[in-house]
Amino acid sequence: TSLTKNGGWDVPLAQRLAACLRRPVAVTNLGGAGETSRWGLTQIDAVRSIQPDVVVIEFSANDASLLKGFSIAESAANAETMARRLAAGESKPKIILAAMNPMHGLRGWIRPWLDQ
């Protein structure tokens, strides 16, 4: 989502991980603003080509939007499919499923099932 694509977290995360691990760390941001887990399914080959050690998946905010037309079941199934396809890759990355909430105001109102 835009929280991933435009969040500005990649450089600070790389710096903190490198300091913690005492070795260089590369963070690659493949997020897409406004995207959903449907789009995420199309990005698995690009992610796998990097051979990452860790993958963070974050689509809950957009999947939960009434404007996107998702069911909770579809969002969950897409996340599971992404995790399974990533785990089947060569690098066998650790997978973190991030859920961005809470949201307030209009952004919260159009996402009534975000907590689910």
Image (cartoon, rainbow, N blue to C red):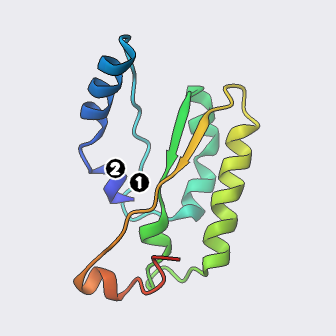
Point out residue 5 in the picture as x, y percentages from the top left corner.
Answer: 34, 50
Q: Which residue is mark 1?
A: 32
Residue at 33 percent across and 88 percent down: it is 109
Q: Which residue is mark 2?
A: 5
Residue at 39 percent across and 65 percent down: it is 34
Q: What amino acid is labelled 1 in the image? A: Gly
Seen in the picture, residue 49 relative to 85 is either above or below; the reply is above
Q: Is residue 80 left or right of residue 13?
A: right
Point out residue 59 in the picture as x, y percentages from the top left corner.
Answer: 48, 62
Secondary structure under tag 2 reads helix
Secondary structure under tag 1 reads loop
Residue at 27 percent across and 51 percent down: it is 6
Q: Are marks 2 and 1 in contact (CB under 8 Å)?
A: yes
Seen in the picture, residue 78 relative to 16 is either above or below; the reply is below
Q: Work out whether residue 65 or residue 33 is closer to the camera in this orientation and state it.
A: 65
Q: Is residue 25 left or right of residue 104?
A: right
* Sequence order check, earlier mark of 2 and 1: 2
Q: Hey, which quadrant is residue 32 in on the image?
A: bottom left
Point out residue 22 in the picture as x, y percentages from the top left corner.
Answer: 35, 11
